[in-house]
Amino acid sequence: MVKLKEYEKYVGVDVIDELELYASKLSGVVVQNINSTSVGGGVAEILTRMIPLLQELGVNALWDVIKGGEKFFEVTKKMHNALHGQSVTYTKEEIDLYLETNEMNAREMDLKGDIMFIHDPQPCALIRKKSDVNQQWIWRCHIDFSRPDPFTWNFLKEYIEQYDASIFSAPSFARELKIPQVLISPSIDPLSDKNKELPQETIDSVLENFNIDKKRPIVTQISRFDYLKDPVGVVKVFRRVRKYVDCQLVLAGGGATDDPEGVKVLAEVQEIAANDPDIFLLLLPPASDIEINALQRASTVVLQKSLREGFGLTVAEALWKSKPVIAGAVGGIPLQIAHKYSGLLTHTIEGTAFALKQLLQNPSYAKKLGENGRENIRKNFLITRHLRDYLLLFLSLLHKKGDVIYL
Amino acid sequence: MSLVAKEPFHFYTRQNLTYLSGRKATNLIELLSGIKEVPEMSIYHHTHHYLEQHEFLSPEPPNDFAYWITNNLQDKLLGEEIASIDLRELLTLNEIRLKFIEAIEFSINENSESLSRTASPGSEFHFMSARTFVFPTKYIANSLGEFDECLKKVSVHSIFYHIFEAKLFKKISNFCDWLSSSLNEQKLAEEFCKLDPYTQTLENLRKMLIELVENRLKEYSYGKA
């Protein structure tokens, strides 16, 4: 199990010392996390890493998972898509099932935390069991909330506003709410397979497996095959740039096989790529963290040409590896990149092509952007900052008055 | 002058939790009305968080308003004016707020083009705020030598607290007062006060403070004190 001390070499002793200082004010406080799955998905991944670290800091962090049948999860999947902006309708039975399942879980679970930390929409209605006035309830929204379906939003809002605080990942996700909305960005873990340092042999062997030439510049976008990630646009960018600079394009991601839209997008990309030997379309299976890590580390420039984005942690992953990144100015990406300082933000195919050409032809400028990018990630988007924000959030609920709190 | 302090200096550290307001601006008029109406802690957040969050970028861009006006409204002239407002001269958050209002209103009156600029969708200015949590650290200085050692060990957040927040929130002990009143080091205190903390990185600031202290310690060791 990873220990806090192992992060010292990345963030410094003072950061770890201060985490211990903040946590010392939370000794004995029980924080009960509840979400809908213990494996798979970003939330489970974050909790798997966070809970042991919180416990090491002396916070009594617990983690429980709600139970629900297949139909319940179909309804919550629909809600998830609706919060992403898809227009949906629900039957009365679906709404009843959502509420009944939450009710059943509330009856069966021991909701004993001093702080109840509820993640995402699936268990949101557990709040109906809030009775003890001293118990503090937090609702954490992990998903893109910039254009939610109005019905779904209004339905959930009734429950969200019964919480003591809500958390969103990016400023554009903020809503008009009666309760405080805290900004806590997600983070990456420098010790995970996706981000840890790799020996050059591992990187070379991954390139070799995919027949990518390590001697020529590599331009990479890591993302699932999804219209919102604009893979077709990326190929067009590449074609414009290759006229002037010899380079290869790697588009790597998963999620196409079980997603009908993903299959369609992949087919379109394959068509436009037209067996170009310098374009590598890599459909990676779920457990490909080392491969993704190696591809990012082997890249000359990383693109994230998203048209819409939740937070876009692939940007943080690439910047952490000191890679110059060109990305769409959407979702949480502008939080990670200050334009021209720690990467380049673009809006169009033409603009992205221009930026890419600029970086491929100016390695020293590209290097500087990558270095600044890594420093920004080191300070603001590693798991230790995420832990710090959670500790402050817990303290904020125990000390509700005043703008400046002396502890 | 004395190497041992009359009163020890207790180093504190602090962290902010950022709050979203749900309020946003797409043009200068909306930005102006937001600046007039948001709580003071929002002004504090938008003028100070950059110093820590984008520390490696300092001295540019110095505040969120200037960054947004320059990069999202593409108003380079006003952006530069807002960026060059000397926060060091302004002693309260209300003074800072009024200075921004004055600069934006002047631009609107003098340059009607300012009013036609609109941020593209997704590039709106989001008003945020902060709550500050202050913690005592284990670092206590009883002499100039110990003060030097502490400056090397405390986090940049502690430096931030004793420099910026001491200026804005008067209750807080600041380096200059302690050097002057507890160590009788008026000249060193003056040198500390002269530094402009808004135009450098926090690590750079730490280095400069240490250098000033160590120069003074050398004077003692050479018997010039």
Image: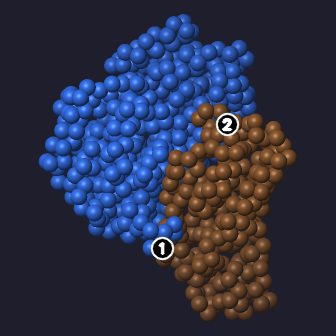
Chain colours: A blue, B brown
Q: Which residue is nearer to you in this view: A67 or A24?
A: A67
Q: Marks 2 and 1: which is nearer the front? A: 2
Amino acid, disc 2: Ala
In the drawing, what numbered circle is on residue A406? 1
Q: Give the vertical position of A271 relative to B90 (above or below).
A: above
Q: Is residue A73 visible?
A: no
Task: Say which quarter of the image contains residue A320.
Answer: top right
Of residue B159 and residue A298, the one placed in the foreground of this image is: B159
**Mark 2 chain:** B
Where does the image place residue A169, in percent across and percent down from the top left? 47, 44
The answer to whether B219 is drawn above or below residue A273 in the figure is: below
Q: Are marks 2 and 1 on the same chain?
A: no
Q: Residue at x 76, y 36 (%)?
A: B116
> Label 1 is placed on what type of residue?
Tyr
Which quarter of the figure is the C terminus of chain B placed in? bottom right
The chain letter for the residue carrying disc 1 is A
Residue at point 71%, 14% (across, down): A243
Q: Is residue A123 above or below residue A182?
A: above
Residue A263 is situated, as x and y percent measured from the top left of the image, at 40, 14
Badge number at residue B119: 2
Q: Residue at x 78, y 83 (%)?
A: B187
Looking at the image, residue B68 sits to the left or right of residue A105; the answer is right
- The crowd level at tag 2 (other Cα within 10 Å; few <14, some 14-19, many 20+) is some
For the residue pair B202 and B128, the one nearer the viewer reads as B128
* Number of numbered tags placed on the structure image: 2
